[in-house]
C-alpha cells in the first residue's frame, strides 16, 4: 500500500524523496507528491506516477528537509488534490500517511465546526488539521503529534514536518510500517527498506505506538506515553541492485528468471545429508514440542495463501499431520478456535500484510504457537511470530508474486521434512525429498528454457475473454495460483476449479470461447485427469495441458512438458510455466505488467 519517504540532512531532499518514491511505487501508484521545507513549505503533488511528479518538481526546490508519498487510493479517487502530502490550513504542517483513519468523518466534522477548511476527500487531511491545532500549545512537534494521535482511531504510518521546525521530521506508526534509515549526518524514514538501501543499510524498525524524531545528527524514539525507547539497529543485506530490472524488460520477468537462484537460497545450509533432515534454526522449537502438534493451520493472503495450500499438502503427505490453509483475512474475522496442539503458520512475502499481521496478533492473544514463513527480515509479521523460516529470496518488486511463491513452497517442503523426520517419515523418504529439493534449481532452469514455446501459447490463448484452470489435489493450488497470476496481470478473467468439481457446475461454461489450462502431473491421478480432458474436449473446449508428458491430441490442443521431480515436490515446478504464461499474456495484451491496475504489492490496510 502507499509508500512514504522522509529525509533530513545536508543534501537537497527533493531528489532523494523522488528516488525513494520510485523504489516504493510498486506499493501504490495512482498519485504522488513531495513537500520540502525551506522558509515555508513547498509542495508538488499529481495524479499519476512518480515520473509525472518528477516532471513537475522544479530544480529550485531546495531544502534539506522533506517528506514524500506515493498513493493507493482508499478515501477519494486518485486526483491531484487527494494526493499526499496534506497541509494544514495555515500551511505550517505537512503530513503523509499510510493506513486508514477510522474516525475521520467524526474528526472532520469537529474540525470543520472549529473553522478548518478541507480541500481533499481523504482521511489523512484530518491529521494535518489536528496537528496544526496541537502544535501551538506543544513544546515539540513530537508532543503535538502524540497529542493529536490520541484522538485518532485506525491504522497509520505517518511522517510530519512543521515549517517552524526546519530541522526535524516526526514519524509514527500504528499498524503501517515505518523504518528509519541511519546515514552519515543525515536521517531517512520510509515505509519500506526499498526506499533506503541506496543510502544506508543501517535501519531501525518502529513498533506500533512508537513515535520517532529524526534530525540530521540522529534520532530518538518514544512510546505512546512519551517514555523514550531503546532501539536495536539492524543491517539489511538487500542491495540497491536488487531493486533494478537488471536488463530485463520487467521486474516480473526478472523475478521469474531468478528462481533457480532464489530456490537455491531458500535451501542453502538447510539440508542434512547424514540424517536426511532439514535444519531450520529459526523455528525456536525443541524436538518434544515439534512432536506435540496434532494439526497445522496455515494462513496468508493472495498468492501466499495458495502457496500455503501447497504447504498443507506437503505437511499432510510428508509429516502425516492434518493440515489446511485459509485466507488470513477470513480467519481473523470468524473467531477461530485456537488450540494448543495446533501449529499455526503465517505466510507473507512482505511481512507487512495487515490481514495476516492482525490474524497473527489474534492467534498470539489466544495463546497460539505461530511460525512465520516470511521474506522480509525484521518485518512486522516476522517479529510478531514465535519463530519461522526466512525465504532469503531477495526483494520482490513486481506486484504479482512469483519467486516468493516458489520459495514459500520450498520452505514448506523443508518444514514438512522437519516435522516428518521427527515422526514417522523414513530415512529413505527423507533422502528422496532432500535429493528432490536439490534438483529443483536445475529443473527450474530447464523450465525457463521453455519460454519461447510458452510465449507463443500465451499469445494464442490471451485473446480468450475467459480461461478455466483445473487441477486435482496437488495440482489444484497450482491451478489457483495460475489463474490468479493471469487475472491480476493480464485482466483476462480466469477461474480455478478442482478438476473433479468441473462436472458439478462449471462444465456449463466450457465451449470454444473458454479454453482450459489443465495441470496434469504424472501421479496416481493421471488417468482421472485425462478423463477430465476428454470431457472438456467433448464440449468443444480447447485444452492447454501442463504436465510431465505430451498426450493424445484428442485430449489436449497444446502441451507444456516440465521435468518430473518427486511427486510431492512437483507442484513447485508446475507453477513456473503458468507464471511465464501469465507474463506473456499480459505483455501480448500490452498491460502494465509490474503495476497492474487497482492492485498494490503490500496491502497494509484491511
Ligand atoms: C497483495 C499482492 C499479492 C500478494 C498478497 C500477500 O495482494 O498483490 O501478490 O500475494 O498481497 O502479500 P504478502 O506480502 O503478505 O505475501
Image: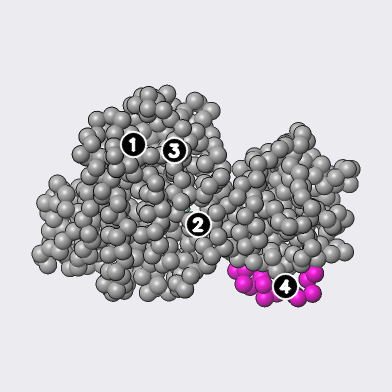
User: Reading the chain from its start, which is encountered first: label 1 or label 4?
Assistant: 4
Q: Is 414 on the left or on the right of 520, as rendered? A: right
Region in magenta: 46-62
Image coords of residue 14 (percent x, y): 73, 67
Query: Residue at coordinates 44% horizontally, 38% vertically from top-left?
Result: 281
Q: Nearer the viewer, mark 1 or mark 2?
A: 1
Quarter of the image for residue 90 reads bottom right
Q: Could you tell me which secondary element the residue under label 4 belongs to?
A: loop
Image coords of residue 194 (percent x, y): 58, 58
What residue is pinned by disc 4? 57
User: Reading the chain from its start, which is encountered first: label 1 or label 3?
Assistant: 3
Residue nearer the viewer, 510 or 16:
16
CA distance separating discs 1 and 2: 26 Å
Q: Is residue 6 above or below residue 472?
A: below
What residue is pinned by disc 1? 418
Numbered mark located on residue 596 in the image:
none
Asked whether disc 3 touches disc 4, contact meaning CB atoms under 8 Å apart, the reply is no
Q: Residues within 10 Å of mark 1 (few under 14, many from 20)?
A: many
Q: Is mark 1 within 8 Å of ligand 1?
A: no
Q: How is the image coloured?
A: one colour
Asked whether disc 2 touches disc 4, contact meaning CB atoms under 8 Å apart, the reply is no
CA distance separating discs 1 and 3: 11 Å
CA distance separating discs 2 and 3: 22 Å
What residue is pinned by disc 2? 395
Asked whether disc 1 touches disc 4, contact meaning CB atoms under 8 Å apart, the reply is no
Q: Could you tell me which secondary element the residue under label 3 belongs to?
A: helix
What residue is pinned by disc 3? 281
Amino acid at each position: 500500500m502507499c509508500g512514504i519517504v522522509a529525509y533530513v540532512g545536508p543534501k537537497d531532499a527533493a531528489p532523494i524523496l523522488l528516488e525513494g518514491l520510485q523504489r516504493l511505487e510498486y506499493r501504490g501508484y495512482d498519485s504522488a507528491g513531495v513537500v520540502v521545507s525551506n522558509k515555508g513549505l513547498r509542495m508538488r503533488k499529481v495524479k499519476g506516477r512518480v515520473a509525472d511528479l518528477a516532471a513537475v518538481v522544479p530544480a529550485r526546490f531546495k531544502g534539506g528537509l522533506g517528506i514524500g508519498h506515493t498513493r493507493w487510493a482508499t478515501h477519494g479517487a486518485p486526483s491531484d488534490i487527494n494526493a499526499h502530502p496534506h497541509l494544514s490550513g495555515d500551511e505550517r504542517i505537512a503530513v503523509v500517511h499510510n493506513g486508514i483513519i477510522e474516525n475521520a468523518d467524526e474528526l472532520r466534522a469537529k474540525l470543520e465546526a472549529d473553522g478548518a477548511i478541507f480541500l481533499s476527500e481523504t482521511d489523512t487531511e484530518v491529521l494535518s488539521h489536528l496537528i496544526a491545532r496541537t502544535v501551538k500549545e506543544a513544546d515539540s512537534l513530537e508532543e503535538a503529534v502524540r497529542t493529536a494521535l490520541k484522538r485518532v482511531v485506525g491504522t497509520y504510518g505517518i511522517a510530519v514536518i512543521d515549517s517552524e521546525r526546519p530541522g526535524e521530521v516526526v514519524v509514527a506508526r500504528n499498524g503501517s510500517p515505518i523504518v528509519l534509515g541511519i546515514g552519515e549526518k543525515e536521517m531517512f524514514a520510509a515505509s519500506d527498506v526499498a526506499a533506503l538501501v541506496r543510502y544506508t543499510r543501517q535501519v531501525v524498525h518502529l513498533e506500533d505506538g512508537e513515535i520517532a524524531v529524526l534530525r540530521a545528527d540522529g534520532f530518538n524514539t518514544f512510546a505512546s506515553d512519551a517514555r523514550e525507547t531503546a532501539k536495536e539497529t539492524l543491517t539489511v543485506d538487500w542491495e540497491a541492485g536488487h531493486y533494478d530490472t537488471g536488463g530485463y524488460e520487467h521486474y516480473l520477468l526478472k523475478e521469474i528468471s531468478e528462481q533457480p537462484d532464489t530456490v537455491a537460497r531458500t535451501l542453502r545450509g538447510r539440508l542434512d545429508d547424514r540424517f536426511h533432515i532439514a535444519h531450520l534454526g529459526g523455528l525456536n522449537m525443541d524436538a518434544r514440542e515439534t512432536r506435540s502438534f496434532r494439526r497445522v493451520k496455515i494462513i496468508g493472503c493472495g498468492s501466499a495463501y495458495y502457496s500455503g495450500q501447497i504447504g498443507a499438502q506437503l505437511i499432510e503427505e510428508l509429516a502425516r499431520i492434518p493440515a489446511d490453509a485459509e485466507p488470513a483475512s477470513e480467519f481473523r474475522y470468524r473467531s477461530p478456535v485456537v488450540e494448543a496442539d495446533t501449529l499455526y503458520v503465517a505466510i507473507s512475502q512482505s511481512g507487512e500484510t495487515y490481514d495476516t499481521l492482525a490474524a497473527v496478533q489474534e492467534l498470539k492473544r489466544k495463546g497460539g504457537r505461530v511460525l512465520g514463513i516470511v521474506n522480509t527480515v525484521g518485518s512486522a509479521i516476522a517479529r510478531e511470530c514465535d519463530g519461522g523460516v526466512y525465504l532469503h529470496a531477495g526483494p520482490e518488486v513486481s506486484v504479482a508474486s512469483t519467486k516468493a511463491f516458489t520459495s514459500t513452497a520450498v520452505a514448506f517442503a523443508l518444514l514438512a521434512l522437519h516435522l516428518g523426520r521427527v515422526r514417522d517419515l523414513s530415512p529413505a523418504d527423507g533422502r528422496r525429498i532432500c535429493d528432490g529439493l536439490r534438483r529443483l534449481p536445475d529443473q527450474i532452469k530447464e523450465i525457463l528454457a521453455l519460454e519461447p514455446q510458452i510465449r507463443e501459447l500465451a499469445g494464442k490463448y490471451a485473446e480468450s475473454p475467459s480461461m478455466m484452470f483445473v487441477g486435482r489435489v496437488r495440482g489444484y493450488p497450482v491451478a489457483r495460483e495460475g489463474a490468479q497470476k493471469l487475472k491480476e496481470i493480464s485482466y483476462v478473467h480466469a477461474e480455478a476449479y478442482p478438476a473433479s468439481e468441473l462436472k458439478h457446475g462449471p462444465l456449463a461454461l466450457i465451449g470454444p470461447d473458454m479454453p482450459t489450462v489443465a495441470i496434469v502431473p504424472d501421479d496416481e491421478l493421471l488417468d482421472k485427469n485425462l478423463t477430465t480432458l476428454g470431457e472438456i474436449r467433448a464440449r468443444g473446449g480447447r485444452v492447454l495441458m501442463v504436465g510431465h508428458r505430451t498426450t493424445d491430441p484428442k485430449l489436449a490442443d497444446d502441451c507444456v512438458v516440465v521435468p518430473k521431480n518427486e511427486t510431492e515436490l512437483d507442484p513447485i515446478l508446475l507453477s513456473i510455466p503458468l507464471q511465464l504464461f501469465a507474463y506473456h499474456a499480459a505483455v501480448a495484451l500490452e498491460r502494465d505488467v509490474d503495476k497492474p491496475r487497482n492492485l498494490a504489492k503490500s496491502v497494509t490496510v484491511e
